[in-house]
Amino acid sequence: MREITGHRPGRILLWVLLLSALWYVFVLPFVLQNTSYLLFGWMPVSVAFYNLQTIIWLLAFWVYTSRYWPYR
Amino acid sequence: MIWIVLLLGVVLVFVSAYGYKLNKKTAADYLLAGRAIGTFVMFFYVYFAISSAWTFYGFPGTIYNTGPGFMLFFSFTSFAFLYIIIGPKLWAGSSKYGYLSPVQFLGERYQSKALRLILGGILVLFLFPYLGLQAVGIGAGMKAAVGLPFWFGALYMTVIMLLICLIGGTRSVAWLNVLLGIIFTATFWGFLFWILIKTDNTSLSELAKRVQEIRPGLLGVPGPVNAWTTQNLMGLALAGLTVMAWPHVVIGTMQVKSMVVVRKTAIWMLLFSLIFCNIAAIWGYLVCPILVPGLKGKAADAVVQIAITKYLPGWASGATLLAVLAAAISTVATQLMVTGLLVSRDIIFSVSNKVTDKGLILWSRIGMVGAAVVSFILAILRPAELGLLLSNIASPGFALWLPALIGGVLWKRGTKEGVIVGIVAGLILLIVGSFFYKPLLLGFHPIFVPLLVDALLYVGVSLITSPVPSSVQKKFFEDIEDYLEEHASRNKQFDINRAPAVSPQVVMEAVKVKVEK
């Protein structure tokens, strides 16, 4: 774990992962209740949030592992 | 068309036989593909170990029944977490100490053979329903596409997967996943666009409006049958995050060639999942409710197949069946290899010091035959609809070893007592709560309470029991991290692309040092 906790970008990645995971499991299910809005006229809110979450994780991992990860 | 499907099975078995010729006949080669899988094959190997008949049938079918709230199950970030944070340590354990399975790694790390038996047993136990649901997928698909009896499709699937694994080993399975993954993706994506054009449904907004008229509430949360309440969604999201605990996914970290492969695989997985999951979901919440309205329960498992059979030419229906077969075989073959590995390395030989390559391979094969038979029986009994068989039974079961896995790799203070108490309590809660007394789960998804209790007990009991000796801690933490750093620096030293300004003389000197070493 020292390879990630030992430098600032690694700690930022861990915070992004932790907060987004907590949001995903404990907050998003409340936010989604009784939603029927369709993004672009066809994409349900649950799908839109799923996509947003995946994009955030993709960018976080991409930037970290291609620039800062010691084992890259 | 059925002849083409049967022919595919024969071709796959022959490809496996060719893979057997390339095999070095060692346990590491047969079970881990010689720890030499590159990025391209690794991506297909892992992604299509996950994307199965379930992805083609169960995923759209469950969304068709319950609404797109089900999407929260597909949280691929956990794969990236596994591959970037946990994976390097498992890879180093495999590469430096020669471990063949993650359970063996944990058994040595926690210094407990009993723990290896318990972990190996639980993982094998919950692999059965997952294996069984692939046979269910093929049985249902063959019935919907060509009218053959359900049992025939399930039996065909079981026999083909068994032959591929028994003959070829992991290397053959990995390469077959590339071929099968391409067939699957082309069909699943291509036919969606084709059916939209063929039925004049090119506007997604128009489709959404019609779905709202035909099935009010389908596009919202909690969905038309009130399936995705807050509690259920929490459990589903948690189940999605624990997909990294699936043994056939974890094992991939020990089969890769290098850390570069690990990194690239994680990124490609996230990128690809974004497209793939949306395509699967659109089948379920936009296309099928319009084209095939009125299905309920288990009948919705074959909704994509029915739509293609109804609106596209006959050969497309057969091609779909071929794609589902490809998806199912790619998943089952990987799972069956892992089952064999767990049975031989972590159950049969967990307490024996006399382990030979021949013995490991033999017992792996016996384990595979046993698992195939049990999964076929499960498929015939078919206790639940496909989507739920995975998300409510197999997935919560796999999640139980997650505290042991994460703690074993990242937390020195974790102890075997903590693992055993946590996992046994979690297992009892899961089985009793799922099958005998539902109030025990407090109204949550089956994964929620058992995993929470498991994790709390693991941490609590670990803190009040003695940790493993400092020499063991050093072996599994400092030494492994040092090994990884050496590996990374070696790679950087010889990666000419990373150092374009270095003169040829310097490069030659570096090569000379390497040769001398």
Image (spheres, rainbow, N blue to C red):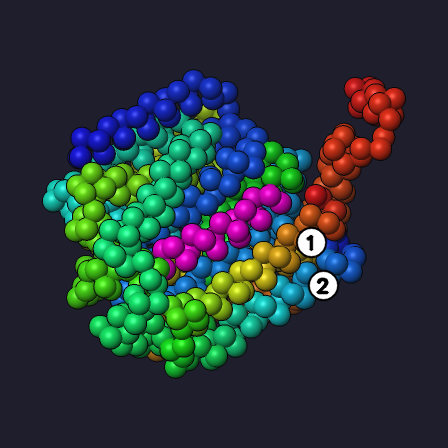
Residue with the mark numbered 2: A12
Q: Nearer the viewer, residue B453 or B227?
A: B227
Q: CA distance from mark 2 to mark 1?
A: 9 Å
On screen, residue A19 above or below B169: below
In contact (CB < 8 Å): disc 2 and disc 1: yes
User: Magenta part of the protein: which range?
Assistant: B263-281
On screen, residue B11 above or below B401: above
- Point 25% across, 57% down: residue: B200
Q: Which chain does the residue under circle 1 lie in?
A: A
Residue with the mark numbered 1: A64
Q: Nearer the viewer, residue B309 or B224?
A: B309
> Badge 2, how many Cα within 10 Å: few under 14, some, many 20+?
some
Q: Is residue B313 visible?
A: yes
Residues marked 2 and 1, same chain: yes
- Point 51% across, 30% down: residue: B33
Q: Nearer the viewer, residue B115 or A58?
A: A58
Mark 1 lies on a secondary structure that is helix
Mark number displayed over residue B430: none
- Point 74% across, 39% down: residue: B488
Q: Amino acid at mark 1?
A: Tyr
Residue B65 falls left or right of residue B37: left
| Position of residue B221 measured from the top left corner of the image (x, y, whole percent) | 37, 76
Q: Main secondary structure of the magenta part?
A: helix
Q: Amino acid at mark 2?
A: Ile
* Total numbered badges shown on the rendered structure: 2
